Structures are given as structure tokens and as C-alpha cells.
């Protein structure tokens, strides 16, 4: 999930989109960071804001007492602006996971602007590249570059536009509201991020400084790092429930920190699903908001992947993990790798090797003579014989554990036996 902490440094003309080829040219990020050029690698717009906003908030935390009304307002505005990102930037505009009425779209534009994470077009462009090129050098916040890099480093360091993977945002370029928000994003960010939360507290109950420190700066800090955790923590903590080819993972802690965006393995496997959490008990307030508003007609065409396909992913991963566990266990030599004997050769060799035949497989039962529950004499009288019927209920219907144990005694197969014919048919 992409996150930009401040105002974009470039402007994209309304008719352009990122599928157009750009000329390859040198960029400072093509060079390694050294003591002599480190300052050139720093994004001097993002970095001061990423440092000053939390520092200012913590200064206010120790110098300005918080009132109950300001505390309540800060929490409310945290959810408003946070959901503006998760329901707006992410699930609506980046993935088109649902459709929204124009009034709700306008609300999301203003709400997400209050998070101060970049314009819709800028945010979505990087996020679509992230999904298309996950865990590669074309991924803007490649998790393989480290937890710190995917959380903050990619914003502190200047981005090389030639290195980021291409992403089509022509649908956003065609929307006049999104173009307007992008053009005047600086004003949107200042008013919704700093001015509005301060004025509400100041005009509402006379707490201007509390509104600025708590509802603006500290609230913004929490929203930022909640979003950043989806880029970082959600690629390190949790389970690969549906696919393990890439780094995204599912974990409830990340979901709690990010307004439901923490079931990230599901999201990367099924990106156009309006949900992140698919179980009713999983925390996903973004899903709850989108679903609730659908009853009022403010959201519609909510996309869901077929349950059958989701179940396939879970079963695939369970089977993969089960296969990995099976490799740790001795299942006996593979039948396809066993030597083939005629039944006459088996009988002749059994005179000196203590072999018996069960279901076309030759077993050397020498190690089991003194352990056999039926006694040594029963095995002795079975040497050189086909004991299939006796093993399968003629004498005793053996358990699955007995079958697994017998598999470790395999030494050969009988020519013309069922397993041999099956192997040949394959």
C-alpha cells in the first residue's frame, strides 16, 4: 500500500499517463551513497516533514494538556482521514474494488487529503507499480530492501523515476475531480491536514493549540505510520495464507494498526476484492464502511472473488506445507525406484532374505520378526508367499500405522503386480 507523506514535486499533465516511455538518463540514485554525495540522495521535501511533524506533535504532547473533547476529535479525525486512504486511495482508486457515488467520492477526496500522503494520482501510480512488480527493483517500496527502507527509507531517499515500474493511470487522468485534486494538492493538504483539525478544536471548545498538536500533528503521525506499516510490517509479520511466492503476509496486528489492511497476503492474491479480511471476526473497518454504505446506495458494485477460488488458494498452501512436512518423514523407498523381480525370482531370493509379498510389493521383514504382534512364527510361515489377502483381513485387517511401517521395509516389486502395471501405464 503506497504512502506519500507530502506534496508531489512534479506535475503530470492531464493527458499524460505513465505507460509512455521516458528517456533513460542519469539519476543520483544510480550512484552509491558516499560521504561526499549523501545529501544529494535525500528527498529534501519529504524528509523535513517526516521529521518535523512527529517532533512537533511530541513537543505538544509534553507542553499542552489534552482535553477530553480534543482527544475524541483527534480519534474521530484519525478514522476519517485513515479511512480516506484505505477506502479511497487504496480500494476505490488504486484497485477499483467497488464504485462510489459522486458525493462519497468527494468526501473521500477531502478525507484522504487530510492524511497528507500525496495526491490520488501520485499515490495510486506507485501502488499499482508495487502490485505489478512486487519484491523487485521496480517496486517503489521493495520489501527485500529491508524493513526500514519499505517503511520510511523509500520516502527519505529520492526516487529514481527511471527505476520505478510503469503503471497505467489513464483512468485517473480522465477524472476531472482527481486532476483538480492533483493540481491543487498543496492547498488540499494544508487545509485538510493542518487547518481544519485545528479550527474545529479552536472554534468548537477554544483549544486551538490542542487541535494543532493532537488532532493535526500527532493524528497525522499515527495515520502515516499506520499506512507505512502496510508497506513494511505486512511484508514481514504473519502467514502466507494463499500464496508464498512474494513477501505479503496476513496478521491481525498489522490489521489493527492499519484499519484492516493487514490481511495483506489475501489482498495481493485477490487485489480487486473490496475486502481485506474475509471472516466476520477479522478486523477490517474499511470493509465494514464500504459494505454499510452500500445499503444507502453510496457504494455499489462491490467486487468479491469467488469463494471457490479463495478456498483453492488456502488448500494449495496447506498442501504445500503438508508436503514439506512429509519430506521430513521416512516413507520408505519410492516404488518407482525399486528393482523388479519375477514371482519365481522373489520366491528363490526369499529363502535367504526373509521376504514376503503384499500387493505386488516385496518387503524384507527381518527387522520385524521379534516385534510382530502376531508372533515370530506367523512371519516365518509367510516368507516367500503373497500375503496380500492375509494382510487385508484374511487373517487380520492391518491398521494404517502397520501399512506405513511396512512401507519402510520395501525392497522390490513383482513383475506384473498392480503397482508395476500402474507405473508402466504412467
Image (cartoon, helix red, strand yellow):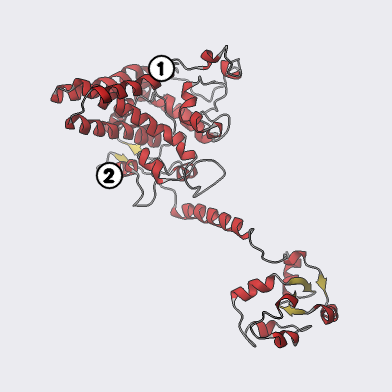
Q: Nearer the viewer, residue 102 or 59?
A: 59
Determine which of the numbered discs, if any, sits on residue 48 in the image. Answer: 1
Q: Nearer the viewer, residue 86 or 35?
A: 35
Determine the image quadrant of residue 363.
bottom right
Secondary structure under the numbered disc 2 in the rendered image:
helix
Label 1 neighbour load within 10 Å: few <14, some 14-19, many 20+: few
Quadrant where the C terminus is found in the figure: bottom right
Count of marks overlaid on the render: 2
Q: In this image, 92 relative to 344: left or right? A: left
Front disc: 1 or 2: 1
Is the N terminus in the top left, top right, bottom left or bottom right quadrant? Answer: top left
Where residue 295 appears, as percent x and y from the top left, is 26, 45
Nearest the viewer among 391 and 51 is: 51
**Helix, strand, or loop for circle 1?**
helix
Checking the image for residue 128, the label placed there is: none
* Residue visible at 53% across and 40% down in the picture: 247
| Name of the residue lying farthest toward the left | 205
Measuring 22% from the left and 32% from the top, which residue is drawn there? 71
Label 2: which residue?
Answer: 292
- Residue 160 appears in view: yes
Circles 1 and 2: CB atoms closer than 8 Å? no
Q: Earlier in the sequence, mark 1 or mark 2?
A: 1
Q: Could you tell me if residue 94 is visible in this image?
A: no
Q: CA distance from mark 1 to mark 2?
A: 39 Å
Q: Whole-percent x and y of residue 191? A: 27, 19
| Left/right of residue 375 with respect to residue 215 in the rendered view | right
Horizontally, is 41 left or right of 103 in the view? right
What x and y, as percent, mark residue 9? 44, 16
**Between 247 and 134, the one nearer to me in the picture:** 247
Amino acid at each position: 500500500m503506497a504512502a506519500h507523506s507530502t506534496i508531489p514535486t512534479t506535475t503530470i499533465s492531464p493527458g499524460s499517463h505513465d505507460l509512455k516511455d521516458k528517456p533513460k538518463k542519469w539519476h543520483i540514485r544510480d550512484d552509491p551513497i558516499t560521504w561526499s554525495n549523501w545529501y544529494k540522495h535525500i528527498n529534501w521535501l519529504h524528509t523535513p516533514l517526516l521529521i518535523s511533524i512527529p517532533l512537533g506533535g511530541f513537543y505538544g504532547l509534553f507542553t499542552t494538556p489534552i482535553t477530553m473533547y480534543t482527544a475524541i476529535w483527534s480519534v474521530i479525525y484519525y478514522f476519517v482521514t485513515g479511512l480516506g486512504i484505505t477506502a479511497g486511495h487504496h480500494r476505490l482508486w488504486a484497485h477499483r474494488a467497488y464504485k462510489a457515488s459522486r458525493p462519497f467520492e468527494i468526501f473521500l477526496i477531502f478525507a484522504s487529503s487530510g492524511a497528507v500522503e500525496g495526491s490520488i494520482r501520485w499515490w495510486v501510480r506507485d501502488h499499482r507499480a508495487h502490485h505489478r512488480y512486487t519484491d523487485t527493483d521496480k517496486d517503489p517500496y521493495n520489501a527485500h530492501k529491508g524493513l526500514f527502507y519499505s517503511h520510511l527509507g523509500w520516502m527519505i531517499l529520492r526516487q529514481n523515476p527511471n527505476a520505478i515500474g510503469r503503471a497505467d493511470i489513464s483512468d485517473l487522468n480522465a477524472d476531472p475531480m482527481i486532476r483538480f485534486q492533483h493540481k491543487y494538492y498543496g492547498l488540499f493538504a494544508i487545509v485538510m491536514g493542518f487547518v481544519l483539525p485545528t479550527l474545529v478544536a479552536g472554534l468548537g471548545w477554544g483549544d486551538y493549540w490542542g487541535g494543532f498538536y493532537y488532532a493535526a500533528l500527532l493524528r497525522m503521525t499515527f495515520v502515516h505510520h499506520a499506512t507505512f506499516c502496510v508497506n513494511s510490517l505486512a511484508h514481514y509479520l504473519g502467514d502466507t495464507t494463499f500464496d508464498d511466492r512474494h513477501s505479503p503476509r496476513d496478521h491481525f496486528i498489522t490489521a489493527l494498526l492499519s484499519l484492516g489492511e493487514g490481511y495483506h497476503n489475501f489482498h495481493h492474491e485477490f487485489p480487486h476484492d473490496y475486502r481485506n479480511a474475509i471472516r466476520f471476526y477479522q478486523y477490517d473497518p474499511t470493509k465494514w464502511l464500504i459494505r454499510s454504505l452500500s445499503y444507502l446506495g453510496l457504494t455499489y458494485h462491490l467486487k468479491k472473488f469467488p469463494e471457490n477460488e479463495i478456498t483453492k488458494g488456502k488448500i494449495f498452501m496447506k498442501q504445500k506445507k503438508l508436503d514439506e512436512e512429509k519430506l521430513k518423514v521416512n516413507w520408505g523407498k519410492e516404488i518407482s525406484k525399486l528393482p523388479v523381480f519375477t514371482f519365481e525370482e522373489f520366491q528363490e531370493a526369499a529363502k535367504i532374505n526373509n521376504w514376503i509379498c503384499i500387493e505386488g510389493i516385496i518387503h524384507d521383514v527381518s527387522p520385524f520378526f521379534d516385534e510382530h504382534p502376531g508372533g515370530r512364527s506367523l512371519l516365518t510361515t509367510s516368507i516367500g508367499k503373497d500375503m496380500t489377502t492375509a494382510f487385508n483381513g484374511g487373517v487380520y485387517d492391518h491398521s494404517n500405522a502397520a501399512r506405513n511401517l511396512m512401507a519402510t521395509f520395501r525392497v522390490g516389486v513383482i513383475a506384473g503386480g498392480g503397482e508395476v502395471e500402474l507405473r508402466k501405464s504412467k
